[in-house]
Amino acid sequence: MKAETRKRTSGCPVAYGLDTFGDRWSLLIIREIMLRGKRTYSEFLQAEEGIATNILIDRLKHLEAEGIVEKSRDPDNRRSFIYSLTQKGRDLAPIILEIVIWSGAYDDRPNAMRDVLEKVQSDRAGFESQLRAGESG
């Protein structure tokens, strides 16, 4: 999944988006940072979807190479890193929110999480603005 080796020959904006952030694990990492305030490798590993360590490492490197996330040393533990969304990553807020809205309309499972959907429905513009500013949902 290395950005530098992937060829985006079609010029299609949908293909570009999917190549950049559109696989399941990349979107879930973005979700963890944007909506749940998670910032560390170990926090990402705790996500309920159960990402494998090799996939997590690959996706974090990919998202960093694409300029969607940036990593910095954890000031409390100099051996660890903290991941955060760049402006490019925060600008994915409308896409993430549209996925939440779409899923809310079609996911009728009893365990479907509705908390973020309720925030979007009560104040979409304010919630999106909060996410774009880098404040977790």
Image: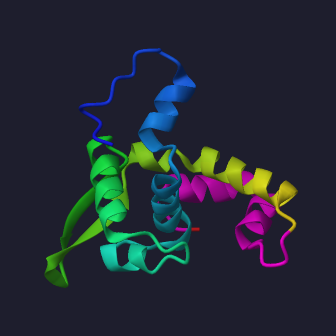
Q: Does the segment drawn in magenta span residue 115?
A: yes
Relative to 75, does residue 91 appear above or below in the rendering?
above
Q: Is residue 108 above or below residue 24?
A: below
Residue at image point 47% right, 50% down: 90
- Does residue 51 appear left or right of residue 83 in this picture? right
Q: Of all residues shown, which one is farthest toward the bottom?
A: 76
- Asked whether, in this view, residue 23 is left or right of residue 56, the answer is right
Principal secondary structure, stretch drawn in magenta: helix
Q: Going by the image, does 5 lie left or right of 128? A: left
Residue 114 painted magenta: yes
* Residue reaching furthest to the left: 78
Tell me what residue is drawn at x 55 percent, y 57 percent.
Answer: 131
Determine whether 49 is above or below 61 in the image: below
Choose between 62 and 136: the one closer to the eye. 62
Count up the numbered dots: 0
Residue at the image point whose x is 39% and y is 69% from the top: 52
**56 or 98, which is in the foreground?**
56
- Residue 21 horizontal/vertical position (percent): 46, 44
x, y percent for residue 111: 78, 78
Q: Quadrant of the C terminus?
A: bottom right
Question: Coloring scheme of the render?
Answer: rainbow
- Residue at x 33% of width, y 43% of height: 1
Magenta residues?
109-136
Residue 123 horizontal/vertical position (percent): 76, 59
